[in-house]
């Protein structure tokens, strides 16, 4: 289980890939969710969820980081947002 400092450190890089373009290195479908390893060159690789995948995805496809809702509202009504990736 993470402590408060670990959650804070993880949050520092949460939006690093927002608006950045990368290339799909690998992908898999887990039930209804498409997850990919995305190469951002000097910024390294990241694992992320792909959205709007009506098109057939291929290794090497270009993607961009966009902000999307990542969960349902909590007890207080707050909605959590995060970065997901869509095909260009």
Image: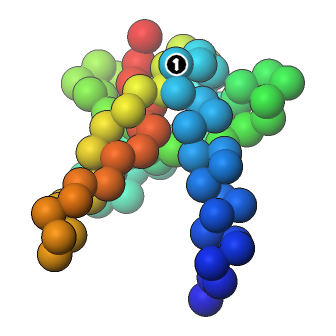
Left or right of 74, for residue 82: right
Going by the image, does 32 lie left or right of 42? left
Residue 65: percent from left, percent from top: 49, 26
Could you say which quadrant of the image residue 43 lies in? top right
Q: In which quarter of the image is residue 82?
A: top left
Residue 13 pos. (x, y %): 66, 45
Question: Does 74 sit above or below residue 53?
Answer: below
Indicate the quadrant containing the N terminus: top left, top right, bottom left or bottom right: bottom right
Q: Position of residue 83 (x, y in %)?
A: 45, 39
Seen in the picture, residue 8 relative to 34 is either above or below; the reply is: below
Residue 52, given in percent of the width and then of the height, sits at: 26, 28
Where is residue 51, by image quadrant? top left
Q: Mark 1 points at which residue?
A: 19
Question: Residue 79, relative to residue 5: is it above or below?
Answer: above
What kind of element bears circle 1? loop
Looking at the rendered image, the quarter that the C terminus falls into is top left
Residue at the image point whose x is 72% and y is 25% from the top: 40
Please, which residue is most extreme toward the top here? Answer: 88
Between 23 and 64, the residue placed more toward the observer is 64
Residue appearing at x 16%, y 75% in the figure: 75
């Amino acid at each position: 289980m993470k402590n408060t400092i670990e959650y804070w450190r993880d949050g520092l890089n949460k939006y690093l890939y927002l608006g950045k373009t990368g290339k799909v290195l690998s992908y898999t479908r887990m039930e209804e969710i498409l997850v990919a390893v995305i190469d951002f060159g000097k910024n390294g690789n990241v694992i992320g969820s792909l959205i709007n995948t009506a098109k057939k995805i291929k290794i090497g496809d270009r993607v961009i980081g966009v902000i999307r809702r990542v969960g349902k509202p909590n007890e207080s009504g707050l909605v959590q947002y995060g970065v997901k990736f869509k095909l260009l």
